[in-house]
Image (cartoon, rainbow, N blue to C red):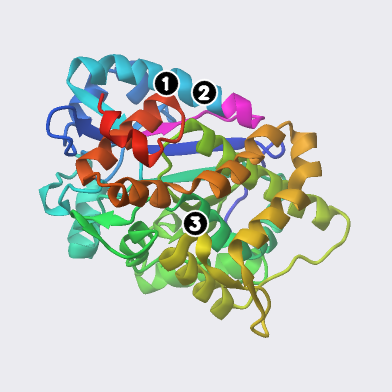
Amino acid sequence: MAIRWNPSRGATIGVEWELQLIDASSKMLRQDAREVLAALPGLSEAGEHPKLRHELMQSTIEVVTGICSTVSEAKEDLAATIAQLERITGGRGTMLACAGTHPVSDWRDAKMAPIQRYAELVEQLQWLARRIQTFGVHVHVGIRDGSKAIPIVNALAAYLPHFLALTASSPYWNGQDTGLASSRAVIFGGLPTSGPPQPLTDWNEFEEYMDTLLRAGTIRSIKEVWWDIRPHPDFGTVEIRMFDGVPTMREIGMVTALSQCLVQLFDSQLDRGYRLPSPAAWVVSDNKWRATRYGLDAIVITDDSGSTAPLRDELFELVRELQPVADRLGCASELDVVSDVLDHGASYERQRGIVASGGGLADVVDALVTEFAEDRFVAPGEAAHAGM
């Protein structure tokens, strides 16, 4: 089966940010995405690629950028759409926030979005799909030459723990501390075609593998392959899907800059004739688990022989390595937010800090709402005053 690659015009960017709809009184998730989207038809029904979209559950609205050239342009695009969204949600007593999970709401209270393909998905996957009341961020980075897609996906797989640890924001599930930095990684990772990308050698092997899945009835479309990193031939992008939901625009800029810089680095290395690294599948899987459990405190495997290093040290080194690329792309300040997260804590750490300081999970929700509204990290001592 031939899969056509639709070339991008360069290292363009597209961002998808899944937001929580939260009741201002109860602090629980509100299942009213349908009504909110109906109030914004110009954004939710505009053409083939609307700015606002349903996700699986009615508790979620996905905000989507157009095709952007720079990280700052992507942030401005998101901000403009969110400003219009907030005019509707504010009048309904609904607050917006983002984290990989809502700390308190029960997935069994979720209502599915009124879309046929979601109904078919739930019928097929049952409990695995019904519990996906989770929230993430997806970043697309364009490449011109589709033959580069699989080598770049393979190379990016080494950075799954980096992506996840920086954004891990789902320590709580159904009102309980899971002991994980990211419970979302486990919940979404339970789907049969999710998880780390299948190690493949080139685009021909990717086409053959997709054809095999289709013949076997495992998937009905290649869009049902929900790898943590995947090629998106229709858009001409590599899509990084490993990020937990992040609460602030600053962190959106960070993950977008990190994604664009890495893809651009690998793209240029291929142009110079380099062979990109392709870590062993067991290393990728093990490192993902380590970041899922320990977040930024993970000790990750750095080569196929089992050498290890603290992930925090690896992140400091990665930022240093990518700095020249970020300077050329104009996203150095956004990439530097990695250092802020290392200093102030990823969201899972900030959330747990609120509880450790005597707050409850309602205070965690308030802090997430404040972080989203004010684009700043809320310190544990502020949590009692964070209500909106």
Q: Residue 77: which numbered mark, if any?
A: 2
The foreground one among 178 and 132 is 178
Quadrant location of the N terminus in the rendered image? bottom right
Give the structural element (helix, strand or loop) at label 2.
helix
Identity of the amino acid at label 3? Leu
Pair 3/2: label in front? 3
Residue 382 lies, in percent from the top left, at 35, 33
In the rendered image of this protein, does residue 331 appear above or below residue 322?
A: above
For residue 3, side relative to residue 268 (left or right)? left
**Badge 1 vs badge 2, beta-carbon distance below 8 Å:** yes
The residue located at (45%, 44%) in the rendering is 137
Q: In the picture, residue 143 is in which quadrant?
A: top right
For residue 361, side relative to residue 195 (left or right)? left
Q: Mark 1 or mark 3, which has the lower sequence index? A: 1
Give the structural element (helix, strand or loop) at label 1.
helix
Identity of the amino acid at label 1? Thr
Residue 233 lies, in percent from the top left, at 57, 49
Regarding residue 348, the answer to whether it shows in the image is yes
Residue 131 lies, in percent from the top left, at 21, 57
Residue matched to label 3: 164
The residue located at (64%, 83%) in the rendering is 306
Read off the magenta span. Answer: 62-74
Q: Residue 81: which numbered mark, if any?
A: 1
